[in-house]
Amino acid sequence: MAEDRSEELPSVRDIDKMIHEPARLLLMANLYVVESADFLFLMRQTGMTFGNLSSHMSRLEAAGYIDVEKEFVGKKPNTKLSLTRSGREAFEGYRQSMRQLFADGAPGNPEESGSHGQRS
Amino acid sequence: MSDALDVDGLERKAYHAYNEDGLLDMMTGFMMAFMGYYVLSEVDIPFAPCLAIFGPAVWASLKKAVTEPRIGQVKFGPGRRSRQQKAIMIFAFVVNVLLVLSFFVKWGPIVGPWRSSLYDYGVILVGSGVVSLILFTIGHFNEVPRFKGYAAVSVPMFIGGHFLTDSSLDLFQRLAYVLIPLGLMMLAYGGVTLWRFVRKYPKITDVEVDG
């Protein structure tokens, strides 16, 4: 029997789609664990290409989640990125909702829900 | 996605990548080998002040010249910095204890069999108890497992040094005979690690990374 579980899982609707996209999630997570990092460091850590990282960086900056600072180190341009306070809070909120969503005992867990998805 | 949510793992990965360059091994190895050479050759230069003045500057320049153009710049969080500060404090504490002990052993009122044992087994006691401990501490707090390996290798080296070096020599000269090969080994392994790092992370042109 198919049942509408959307009301049982309000957190699914609350998930921040700006962060939920895998590339942006990786970028946010990498910035969450440091104070700041430059463009090259993030390219190395995430494995993203220049164009891909640049486009996601612009979206997150527009959402107010990251702070982008362009400066010159000697004669070389350097782009430094860091999470803003709201970006940090949004990422923590995202982690919290994902934890709740996948927590043990959540509806749909085969071991908790009896007849649904029992192993043969 | 689970990788991105394991923030501790990500922080460690970022930190390891930044310290994968072998420079810490090379710097530490060079200092140990030079310290050994300094003791044996009795060169009259103030080693400790030179190290304190030029060490951090040389370290920062090497990171800027070798590591950052390849892997980028990063500033780690306060948790990581406090771990490093702890390592520095333990290092300073051990060095100070060593200095005070050497002062008392050489000029202090300590006499009798305790003092002569300290001299007789000094290569093992000071080597394994201080040098190996310092290497282990660096490895533990900086999360560079290679240093725990160096610490493990250094113990049999100091024991071997105790039996192989001339017992009529001064304690520091006997220690120097172990410090030089140990330092050179670290320098060489650091060089290999650096070579791997340079191959793994070739330089990227400015046009590609100016964001």
Image (cartoon, coloured by chain):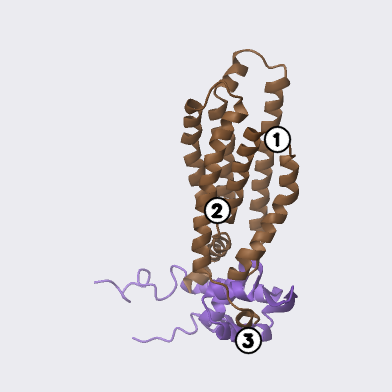
Chain colours: A purple, B brown
| Relative image position of residue B101 (x, y in whole percent) | 68, 27
**Can the viewer see residue A17 in this picture?**
no
Q: Which residue is pictured at 53% across the width and 53% down the height?
A: B190
- Disc 2, SS: loop
Question: Mark 2 — residue?
Answer: B143
Q: Quadrant of the C terminus of chain B?
A: bottom right
Labels 2 and 1 in the same subunit: yes
**Can the viewer see residue A61 in this picture?**
yes
Q: Which residue is pictured at 50% across the width and 83% down the height?
A: A7
Quick one: label 1, few (<14), some, or many (20+) residues within 10 Å?
few
Report the Cα–Cα distance between label 2 and label 3. 35 Å
Amino acid on which the number 1 mark rests in the picture: Asn
Q: Which residue is pictured at 27% across the width and 71% down the height?
A: A119
Amino acid on which the number 3 mark rests in the picture: Arg
Report the Cα–Cα distance between label 2 and label 1. 24 Å
Dot in front, 1 or 3 = 1
- Disc 1, SS: helix
Q: How many marks?
A: 3
| Relative image position of residue B88 (x, y in whole percent) | 67, 46
Question: Who is closer to the viewer here, A102 or B211?
Answer: B211
> Pointer 1 and pointer 3: residues touching (CB < 8 Å)?
no
Labels 1 and 3 in the same subunit: no
Position of residue B88 in the picture relative to residue A16 (left or right)? right
Question: Mark 3 — residue?
Answer: A59
Q: Chain of mark 2?
A: B
Labels 2 and 3 in the same subunit: no
Q: Which residue is pictured at 75% across the width and 39% down the height?
A: B46
Q: Chain of mark 1?
A: B
Position of residue B19 in the picture relative to residue B109 (left or right)? left
> Which label number is shown at residue B96?
1
